[in-house]
Structures are given as C-alpha cells and as structure tokens.
Amino acid sequence: MSRLYIAEKPEVARAIAAALGVGIERRNGYFRCSNGDNITWCYGHMLALCDPEDYDSKYGNWKFEDLPIAHIPWRKKPLSDKKEQIGVIRDLLAECTEIVHAGDPDDEGQLLVDELLEFLNCAKPVKRVLINDNNERSVKRALSAIEDNAKFRGLSQSAEARSVADQLYGYNMTRAYTLKAAEQGYQGVLSVGRVQTPILGLVVRRDRENQSHVKTHYYHVYADLDVDGVRFTARYVPNKDQDPIDDKGRLSDPLFARQIAEAASGQPVKILAAKTSAKRQSPPLPYNLLKLQADCSRKFGLKPDQVKDIGQSLKDKHRLITYHRSDCQYLNDEHFDDAADVLDAVGKTASVFKNAIASADTKIKSRAFNPDKVSAHHAIIPTVKTANMDDLTEDEKRVYLLIARAYIAQFWPDHEYNQTDIEAEIAGKKFVCRSNVTVKPGWMALYKNDQGNAETATDPEDLSVDLQMLKPGNSGRCLTAEETQFETKPRPLYTMDTLLNDLTRVAKYVQNPKLRELLIEKDKGKEGEHGGIGTPATRDEILRNLLDKGFLLEKGKNIVSSEIGQQLYDALPDQAKFPDMTALWHEQQQHIVQGGLDAQRFVNSLMEYISGEVERVGREGISLNVKKYPCPECGKPLRRMRGSKGFFWGCTGYKDGCKVSFSDKAGRPVLAPKKAEPSSKFKCMACTHPLVRRPGKQKGTHFWGCSNYPECKQYYPDAGGKPDYSKHTKG
C-alpha cells in the first residue's frame, strides 16, 4: 500500500516529511519517501467557483434584465497560478492506493482538499489527519491519530454551501444596487455582502448614535471620611423612590446633590456594613486571531490584515507559533505536557522573558487547558522552535512577544486580592465604597504596563487604601462632602480594536429574538465569541474591502462611515444590514454538517430570497443623494480610486486626455482653491496692472497684490474689501 499525503501548504508537507522519519527525496512539487509514500501540497484553495461570465459571456456586461444570476449546479475552475501543481497531484493520485487529507483543521481546510479530489475524479480511500502545529512532536502525535475522511464530509459541504451562497448573494445584490445607483449618476460599485454589509451597518448606527447624542448632566456626591484614623472617600447612593434620578439611577438635579453634600459635611459617620472577600483573578487566556488583532491594533496601530500576515510568517517562515488563524483560546492536555519545552524555547528566543520564565511553574494548570473547549484549532501559542530575534522584523518581534507573554502567564499564580465593601450612614443617608488590596500580584506583574487592556483594567472608583480593619459599628466624621457634575457621553466612535471586538458579539444587535439565540448558539463554548459574525480568517479582509470601496473611512484612530456608505445602508432592507441572515444561514449549515440538508437545497432556498430582492429593487429603485465633484479642468466627474500610496481622485475624462488627479481627505477630493481673478476696478499705482485680492498669512485677513507679480512686487493692505493706497508697500 502506498499513501499520498496532501497538505494545505508546502510548510505542512515539510513538517509531515520530517515527522515520518523515513528517507525523503525532494522532487518537483512533492516529496518521495523511501517507504514508497509521497507527500504533496496545495497552495491554499486550488480551485475557484466559476464567475458568471464563465457560464455565459453576456454576464461580462452588467444589465439588470440579466438578474438574478443563478447557476445550480455550480462549477469550479483551476486557479491559473495553481494549474501546474494540480497536474502534479493528478499524476501522484494515479500511483497511490490511499490518500491522507492534511488540509488545515477547519471547514475551509477540509473543503480545499475535498473539492480538489472531486475535481480530479478521485474515488480512492481517503483518511484525515488534523495538524495544528508544524513542529515534529505535534505532527507525529497527529499522524498517530488518523481518522476516516468521511467523518468530516459535512464540514466540507457546509463550507461549500456558504461559499456558493456568498457568491450568488454578492453578485446579484451588488449588481442590482450598483445598476440602480448608476441611473442616478453614481459611478462606483455598491458592494453588498452577507458579512460586510452588517459590519457597515454597525459602524453607520454607531456614527449616528454618536452624532445625535444630546448632552445632559448627572451628579455624584463624594464624602471624605475619617473613621478611626482611616481616611477614605465614599459615594452617596441615591434613593430610587425619593431622589430625582435619571434612567440609570444617577442624581439629575444639581441643587438636590448640593443639599446632600451640605447636609453630610461635618456630620458623624457610622459604619453599617463592612465585608472583606478574598478574590482570585485568572490570567487572560492565550490568543485567538481576533484577540491578537485587537491587541496589536490597540498597542501598535497594526491593521488586522498586517497581523494575519505577520502570524503567517511567524508560523511558516520562523515556525515560532502554532496555527495563527485560530478562533479558539483553549489548549489540550498534551500542550500542558509540552509546557517545559515550550517555555525553554521561548526563553532561548526572547531573553526579555528570562526572569518571567524562571518564575513560571509548569505544575500550574490554568483554565486555558480544557480539551472540551478546543474545536478544530487550539489557541495560538509559541512552539518548541527557537530563533534569533535579530532575524525577525520589528513587527514580528512585537507579535511574538505578545503571544509568548500570554502563554507564560498560564504558568504564573492567580492574581490574589482582598476586596472590602463598606456601607456607611451620614445624616441618615447611605454612602458606599470599595477597596481592593493586592495580596499576591501573580500574573498581573507581567501586564503592569499594559495600558488600555480591558482584562487588567480596574474600576476607577475602587480605592487602593486598606479598609479591612473597619467593622460594623465603627464611627467617625465626614470631613467634607461635595457634589461633582458629570456629562453624559455617547458610545464612542469605533476604533479598529473596538470594532473587531464587537464583531464577536453582534448577536446583541439582531432584532429577532429567535435569530439572536441562533447566533449565540453558534458560538456556544467559544471563549471571546458570543454570537459573532465573520471568521477570524476573513474579518480583516472584509474590513479592508469596506475601506477600499470607500464605505468606511479611517479618521485618525477612528473607523467611521462615509457619506456613500450611509446612503447604501439606508437603501438596503433590514435583513441585509443586520446580522440576521448569518443566523439563518448558520442554522441551515448546521443541518448540512449533520447530514440533514444538502448544499444544493440550501442554495435553492437562498435563490428564492435573492430573486424576490432583485425584483423589489427593480420595482422600487433606490434613493441616493449622489454628490458629484466636477473636474476643475474639463468639468467631467471625478472618481475616487485606490493607488499604491492610498486613495486619490482621478478624472473620468482620462481617456479623453484629462489626466489631472487630486489627493483624498476623508472621502473627498482636495481641490486646489480657485484662483482669484484680477480686479477690473483697482489698478497697481506702480505699474498700472490690475490688483488681485489674496488671503493673508493670518486667518481671515487679506491684502491686494499686483497681478504682474513677480515683475512687480507692490502690494497694499485690505480695507473693507478695497486696497488702502495710502499704505502701499513694495515687496
């Protein structure tokens, strides 16, 4: 019997070759093993779904009468740059008696080898190996647990159904909306997608909520207390039945707040309740891709697609980390067994962690080691491979150190602290406070300088003073009390890291309660995902597409919607701009995974919805307020485009010879200010040429200069829109 191993990429094929422990000969597109087996590889997906014009050339031109486009059953085509390797695999399939599918352990990894075998009409037995980590020990472990590939067919079918559905939905909805927008003069493409459009919706709604916020004020009363020589601050607790409060239970009347403060100042204090509880805080879980992208955006300003590329390099080029596109933050028991070797490798690679690793205890088993919560992938962690840090780029170093720190923290003790809650009475009113006193910093010592980390942040009102000695019945005095005014604030505009984090819990924005529960059920057991949309591997690409299309804009650190993005949002039905569709699809895809529904029936059902939407758009049209920017040279419309250095605006009259272009600022062209026309009324006293009124150096000021400049450098101050000839100056 001879086996053919088909890996998802060359790096995995090399790892399999090393783990088999037999003689290996490198050949064109594969490895020949001394035992007669062969190991070959794909380069990711080798096939693509055929485009509409592959079925009929008429679809190359967008026409509304050709919609909806539906090709069932669908076809696939080899990607042009993968044809040679497909030929290698075809020849090797003819030689073997059994195939071992070694695609990545997720639904897309399952599909890309399955679809290739189907495309090549292979009917030979297929086994499945699940490899998360390219290091030899892990690969050997995986090769000893090979399973029947048929067990995973539902995963492959589900991925294919989603891919076809996304294509048909995107092609039809994008063409329908773009064609109707073109009738109103819009020149771009109104791209619509199952995931990208709800993401656009999140940003549009957040922007509008922020812009429409009406500022109000609320008040807290703080009292500075001295009880048995212990000084601390407590806050008044409003009486919800008697006090003037807002919808969040905060004082809304400044005069009432001042009365509370004045009544408390100088009065006796009695401790009504004092309770101290011992608390423990576990270390943050190791990273999945989304958490890594969010932290890298917050700390280093890296974009999500950059982080994914860096992870790919750390995994494949340097072999320093495990599978980098994981959606999981948990680890298996065998990873716990490998801890000493992994920590040793991290210490040799990153000397900055030498002391942290010396203090680590490999007998500590954190909550991260939970096989029941590991799905197709485990968390992103360092491997037993070492490297010279000088061989890494600065960004690679940063990302590796983050991953390594999160891993090291799993072997540090919990953060232990004592939490004391105090309830006091002053002038018949209740005041409260809380203090936290660290007993053992534990893993928190590794994160002490990590500003902005939500997992290490504390409540700003919590005190650090030790109140454990206070007991009910203790008395003292309120030294001073004063009211403090606060301003209500809207939820802040999205940043890249807050948007990424929100994509993991979009279920809260789903309007239908049943669909909301479906989305939450989709992520059951996944730490950090609570009804999310998109996948760790695709979210960054979708965000980049929204930015490239001009629907989203980067405004400083914020991600905001553009004018056309908001108009597209307004034109779409709710089902398209909320995450409801993903919830519906998930339910049906689960049936596909379990064998209760086939992909074609799912796609047929979707086409009924698409047909109805195309018919509605054709009948009702869409409402767009298209803002046009005419070219100052030829008058034809300008178009926003993406170049190698970012966005710019070019003239649509380019083919007619108008080659002007303008830089982009917040989605608008930066047009040169209109040249001031020479005056027909005011002449230069020195040379008699007409004068020109120009803006001065200081904002809002003007002066009059000679139109014969630089030959004549005479200029005059501006006096009420006229030149002041009495104060002429020669430049």
Image: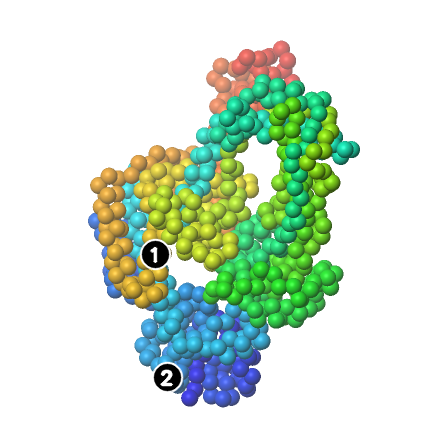
Q: Sequence-wise, which precedes: disc 1 or disc 2?
A: 2
Q: Secondary structure at mark 2?
A: helix
- Residue 523 position, x and y percent, is 44, 56
Q: Disc 1 and disc 2: Cα gap in Å?
A: 39 Å
For the point 52% across and 69% down, the residue is: 132
Kind of residue indicated by mark 1: Glu
The residue drawn where x is 35% and y is 49% is 515
Residue type at mark 2: give it: Ala
Residue name at image x 47 percent, y 17 percent: 680
Quadrant of the rendered image containing residue 319: bottom right
Q: Residues within 10 Å of mark 1 (few under 14, many from 20)?
A: some
Question: Circle 1 — which element?
Answer: helix
User: Which residue sits furthest right?
Assistant: 229
Say left or right for 396 vs 154. right
Instruction: Name the disc covering residue 587, or none.
Output: 1
* Front label number (1 vs 2): 1
Looking at this view, name the residue that lies furthest to the top: 726
**Picture coordinates of residue 141, whole percent (x, y):** 54, 76
Horizontal arrangement in the rendering, residue 698 relative to residue 495 (left or right)? right
Q: Quadrant of the N terminus?
A: bottom left
Residue toward you, 199 or 457: 457
Instruction: Report the residue marked by disc 2.
Output: 94
Q: How crowded is the residue under tag 2: few (<14 C-alpha within 10 Å), some, or many (20+)? A: few
Q: Give percent across and percent down for residue 683.
A: 53, 16
Note whether 592 is above or below 35 in the view shown.
above
Name above or below for residue 681 compared with residue 486: above
- Please tell me in which quadrant of the rendered image residue 156 appears: bottom left
Q: Camera-side residue: 98 or 432?
A: 432
Residue ID at (33%, 73%): 118
CB within 8 Å, label 1 to label 2: no
Which quarter of the image is occupied by the C terminus?
Answer: top right
